[in-house]
Amino acid sequence: MSFWEEKIEVIERNELERLQLERLRQTISQAAQSPFYKNLFTGKGISSDSIKTLEHLQDLPLTTKDDLRSGRPEDFLAVSPQKVVRLHVSSGTTGTPTAVYHTMQDLDNWADMVARCLCMAGVTPSDVFQNMVGYGLFTGGLGLHYGAERLGVTVLPAGVGNSRRQINLMKNFGTSVIHIIPSYALKLIGTMADFGVNPREELNLRIAVVGAEPYSEATRRRIENEYGLMVVNSYGLSEMNGPGVAFDCPHQTGLHLWEDNYILEIIDPDTLEPLPAGQTGEVVLTTLCREAMPLIRFRTRDLASIIPGDCLCGRTHRRLSRLQGRTDDMLILKGVNIFPMQVESVLMGLEETGRNYVIVVDKDGDLDKMTVRVEMSGSLFSAEEQAKDQAHKKISQLLRDELLISPAVELVDPGNLPSSEGKAVRVIDNRPKEAG
């Protein structure tokens, strides 16, 4: 088992919490340099001296995306503009994009965290790392790029798209590690088949770093089986730097969240009360090493749980479960709460289904109607109609058992659903928006 910073990765719990408290108090002082937190702290009598224990953090107000969007981005800037060397902007897939500032110190620390993640996953300086996600305002490309270089890995900054060129790069340069979003990983397998490329036999791939959009464990296993490699899950968000917040180790039993850089809370998204380990709620994060833009108790909207117990890898930082979805992704149909991940977990575990699907929600009179459109696998496409009918009944029953409602199911010919080389659009909600 390899370590990037072994002393901090296996630090004793009580020592880690002492470090967190020290850094939290420093963060409160740093955050108070920004107009937003200065005004907030002054009004509530908050200062670094008022934080005596880690539990006192829960007395502080939560920060939300709406806070970041409601004023000027520089209201959260805690250093002079002259110290800012980079600005990233979130994708804005669920609302107005948010801006995040970085100093050189921030970027240096971020690269170290990503290097720590990659090293933990088994990446070494002898690997060739093909970075197949977007560069620019999206944090995923540059975040993994600089972290891999910090580790000493040879990096191919391939960016997104041009699937044939991606495959040729893998073949020509012996790519062994890829960074890819899950929906594109599934699409690329189809492209490889079209060009007669068998990734298990013709490529040198051994690890895929996968993230940027929620995906199920069934999708992870499908990607692993198709490519013949190990998939490690990467968790991050622009407001917390980007990738590198939490990462799988090779045991794949949860994502180690680096608690020397973040304080992790899980809260009930409705009552805002803290939840114990093992119980799913909303992930709340506080930065501990951010200079330009520290954030206090930031509501991520991501749903997950803390995995109790220790990991076999020996790291002492708590583990975060696979994301169960987002609070703003939830659909309510016929009084039932439904997350797209539930649909994916059913579809991707079946040999009858292909690699692409979409959920369409419409109004049928006064009632909501949900339709799941899923591509058939190649073998089902060429099968008799009776086999297709049986597959349709099977998928419908499994979805009904999982969702507790009965969505309509449409089996679509392979390649007939729109696909994207960026984040996949899994839900099309055609219901009229309520006024106000």
Image (tube, rainbow, N blue to C red):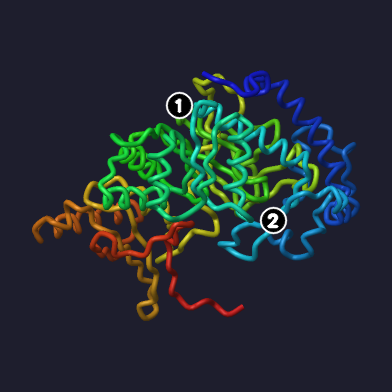
Q: Earlier in the sequence, mark 1 or mark 2?
A: 2
Circle 1 crowding by C-alpha within 10 Å: few under 14, some 14–19, many from 20: few
At mark 2, the secondary structure is loop
Q: Residue at x 35, y 37 (%)?
A: 224
Q: Residue beneath label 1, please?
A: 251
Q: Observer-nearest residue: 327 or 1?
A: 1
Q: Residue at x 85, y 43 (%)?
A: 30
Vertical comparison of 184 with 5: above or below: below
* CA distance separating discs 1 and 2: 33 Å
The quadrant in which the C terminus is found is: bottom right
At mark 1, the secondary structure is loop
Q: Is residue 104 left or right of residue 237?
A: right
Circle 2 crowding by C-alpha within 10 Å: few under 14, some 14–19, many from 20: some
Query: Disc number at residue 287?
Result: none
Q: Observer-nearest residue: 242 or 309?
A: 242
* Location of residue 227 by image quarter: top left
- Residue 287 position in % (x across, y down): 73, 41
Query: Disc number at residue 64?
Result: 2
- Residue 163 position in % (x across, y down): 40, 53
Residue type indicated by callout 1: His
- Residue 135 position in % (x across, y down): 58, 52
Vertical comparison of 343 with 305: above or below: below
- Residue 373 position in % (x across, y down): 31, 63
